Amino acid sequence: MDEYQYFICRSKSSGCKMFGTAQSSKAQFLDKARQAREERRELKERERAAIQIQALVRRFLCRCWLQREIRREVEDFFEINESASSKRSALSIFKISRKLLFVFRIKEDKERFEKLCHCILNSMDVENEPKVWYVSLALSKDLTLLWIKQIKDILWFCCEFLKQLKPDILQDSKLVNLHLTMLVTFTDTSTWKILRGKGETLRPAMNHICANIMGHLNQKGFYSVLQILLTNGLARSRPSLSKGTLTAVFSLALRPVIAAQFSDNLLRSFLIHIMSVPAIVTHLATLTPERLAVLESHDLFRKFILFLSREAQCRDVCVCLEGSHTLCLLGNLIYLGSLNDKVLEDETAHFVSVLIHMLSYCQKYVSQKKSNLTHWHPVLGWFSQTVDYGLNESMPLLTKQLQHLWGVHLIRILFSDVLSKKLVETQDPTYPSGQTASPQNSLPMKNLFKRAFQKSASVRNILKPVGGKRVDSAEVQKVCSICVLYQTTLTTLTQIRLQILTGLTYLDDLLPKLWAFICELGPQGGLKLFLECLNNDTEESKRLLAMLMLFCDCSRHLITILDEIEVYEEQISFKLEELVTISSFLNSFVFKMIWDGIVENAKGETLELFHSVHGWLMILYERDCRRRFAPEDHWLRKDLKPSVLFQELDKDKKRAQLLLQYIPHVIPHKNRVLLFRNMVTKEKEKLGLVETSSASPHVTHITIRRSRMLEDGYEQLRPLTQNLMKGVIRVKFVNDLGVDEAGIDQDGVFKEFLEEIIKKVFDPALNLFKTTSGDERLYPSPTSYIHENYLQLFEFVGEMLGKAVYEGIVVDVPFASFFLSQLLGHRHSSFYSSVDELPSLDSEFYKNLTSIKRYDGDISDLGLTLSYDEDVMGQLVCHELIPGGKTIPVTNENKISYIHLMAHFRMHTQIKSQTAALISGFRSIIKPEWIRMFSAPELQRLISGDNAEIDLEDLKKHTVYYGGFHGSHRVIIWLWDILANDFSPEERAMFLKFVTSCSRPPLLGFAYLKPPFSIRCVEVSDDQDTGDTLGSVLRGFFTIRKKEPGGRLPTSSTCFNLLKLPNYSKKSILREKLRYAISMNTGFELS
């Protein structure tokens, strides 16, 4: 690089440094200037803020001073007003009001405002001094508008206070009256003295001012204020509003509606805010019936119904109210309807339509179960909308209002077309005139006089489907709508469902007349029409099915609460022949629904219909099982071939499974027993309990001492697993010294062991089981707890009983019907009634309880309580039927509950743990679904064999002979002849018990007797018998006797179902010895 270039570079370098220094100092200078500028700005901001704060504080202090001065002036005014003898002018009141309103604060000026209200009201009460009357300022040209604004403000502050006041507090109730008086006085001109005499000409103008004031209040939320006040005062068990207060509130509520000539907007507000107050109509009827008369004079009930009959408006009201308050509105409308017969008769269709819409709205939110999204409602149950728990106190009153819907009075009006039908030649007995139709009497029980009066009426023709009435006729559509209403009521008001059903069944002639109505529907009547409706998804079909559903629900409830005398002797509501017709219809309907595949895919209303019809059917079927009213084979379906059903079951077809689940009674009993045995066999094969060519089942060996059979059996069998208990068990009997008894168990010894065990445990002397009074049938003993480990013992008994049924061994153990029902699981069914089963426990006790039901006097005179006194081993023990029951007297109101509680206690509570243990053991062997296809009597037959006459031909056909005997042997011919011609049916049963230990034949005939019945020729006594030899067989075959056996009796080995018969020489000897042997029961010995 040359010198020139070097110089240039140096110059540039030094210039850059100089420039950089200058720039740095400039930046610092600018930064300082900016900081100084910001400081000056902050200072100015602080000064401005200080000035603003000072101004605000001065303004605040000035305002406070001014407010204090004004309040002091107001107080001075009221003090002077109270002490001065002269009346203050309206103008002075107006001025002081302006000042007070200028500084008004609700919390601070509460007392001053009260004094102002008193002052204004006092001015209105002065006689003949127009200048004193506060309202006179409305006539002043200069002050009219200002006065109107002032009175609007004052009245709205009255409303604000009313929202906060609690009418149940004495001091607050006085203030409520004060503010209400203000509102009443200045929203109507009727009390204004200024309009008297010559002032009457001013009334139209003054009315206009009142309307203006009322319109202003409405816009601000006047109805909401009244709703809060009414709810606070009435939504409780005892209302805290006085007659005067309630009259004032309701008058205020009506004024805008009447003034607006019942416009839709005002009717809507009135319905939403006033008519939705819980039980307000009841309180009006009780406290101030004059207000109800005003409603009636303006025909408001009709206007309400017509307004709500428009679906959009009804939905709008329901949405505004939500569920709880919709129900309150519903209750008020129903009660109002019960007080307005004429309107109800004229507007039945609209009334029914409105109620259906409102109930349907509530129903959308009624839930079947508790969840995070549901709340408990005392009438609706689990409800998926917010529930106002503040209304709970008023629920009893609301329920009483709702009860009018299913009370006699409304039912007679709504079902007038149905009830007008004549079912008897003479006129039906009317409702006793001395008895009130109000449901508030909690639907009193039918008395004997009423029954006797009805029974004296001439017998009617039996009702059967005849058809002929068009389903699209106005009459049918009306009845269908009413049925839809009551059906919707049942599914919505879930917690009072039983009350509703009781009300609907109270009139004895409603259900038979409804059945008569159903019988007339369609071209042919009955089944075909309703089956067609199932396949038509039209509104008309749904309504017809709702009618059927209501009929079934009500009839089922009726038959459940009627006792045996009322159903069979008095035949209340239905004749027995009608029950046969109805059950035939129901049986066919349910069968078609299942077999045609409708139930498989059913949901919603169709499924509810099925359960309703099926429930009524099963009630009738179980009644018939307990005491027959239907002819033989009535319940069977002739068009159902058992072979087809079994094939479909093998293929797991859904309809076959449903048929077996819901109506197994349509299949012949023997076929069901075959099906049961088939199910057991299949399980045995699945568990490997059946001998096959490739495998043998596992065998459990037990050793039993005869003297301690129960104890040894319990100790050795109880530890076995479920599958081992179902398997093969071999028994070896030993004596007390441990020496084996003769004999090999090939099921026979186990059969004897099982029979002996069952015989011991079911012996009433052991006190595990008791016998019923009368027919001496068995059930668990309530005092069986005295046994050590008694529950384990009951479980073991259940296992042994289950094993007997599992192996097809019939045991002669007659159970009480109610206990069999529990074994089947019927107690958990909605069709079950403890009272109906009570006669099977104690018929005398049942008669005593039903006499309480029929008692016409005051039941409390009998001195009964909700408790049961029992003599337990010499000590009197008091059992409370409900907590505190011994202090609760039985009255006419709770006597039905007492009967049901008593029946439930005797049959369930007393033996609950014993029954549960036995059922647990039984079900460990026998699956519950296997025996659900049997009724209680059929289960007894499954356990103890058929109660039919012994079929000797069947027994002869399946008899095996030993020891030289054969079918043509003369002793055998004599035997069969004696059994057929000389023995009575009772003696033949004794003979069967003698040889098999059970007096009844196997259900499916003697082909299923295990081991098969056999007869053996014997020559010597049992203790010398060494079995068949060639010589003994030949001698028996050729009738060669060592010596005459005339002194010996026939014996038996029940474990092998074996009859040991000596080779008698004469028929008469055989007859005599056999008759003696079976009567003395000399059998039951081991070969």
Image: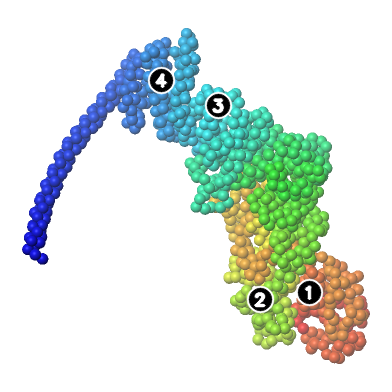
Q: Who comes first in sequence, dot 1 or dot 3?
A: 3
Q: Quadrant of residue 397?
A: top right
How far apart marks 4 and 1 lie (CA) works out to 104 Å
Q: Secondary structure at mark 4?
A: helix
Count of numbered badges drawn on the protein: 4
Q: In front: mark 1 or mark 3?
A: 3
Q: 10 Å neighbourhood of mark 4: few (<14), some, or many (≥20)?
A: some
Mark 1 neighbour density, 10 Å: few (under 14) some (14–19) many (20 or more): some
SS type, badge 2? helix
Q: Give the amino acid at mark 2.
A: Leu
Q: Residue 136, image x and y in percent?
A: 41, 14
Q: Amino acid at mark 3?
A: Ser
- Name above or below for residue 37 compared with residue 102: below
Q: Are marks 2 and 3 in contact (CB under 8 Å)?
A: no
Q: Give the amino acid type for the residue marked by disc 1 in the picture.
A: Leu
User: Quadrant location of the N terminus?
Assistant: bottom left
- Mark 4 or 1, nearer chain start: 4
Front label number (2 vs 4): 4
Q: Residue at x 60, y 42 (%)?
A: 360
Q: Which is nearer the eye, 594 or 902?
A: 594
Left or right placement of residue 74 versus residue 642 in this view: left
| Apparent side of residue 772 relative to residue 1069 in the rendered image (left or right) | left
Q: Which residue is mark 4?
A: 148
**Residue placed under numbered mark 1 in the picture:** 1009
Which residue is the site of mark 2? 687
Residue wearing tag 3: 263
* Label located before the other in sequence (4 or 3): 4
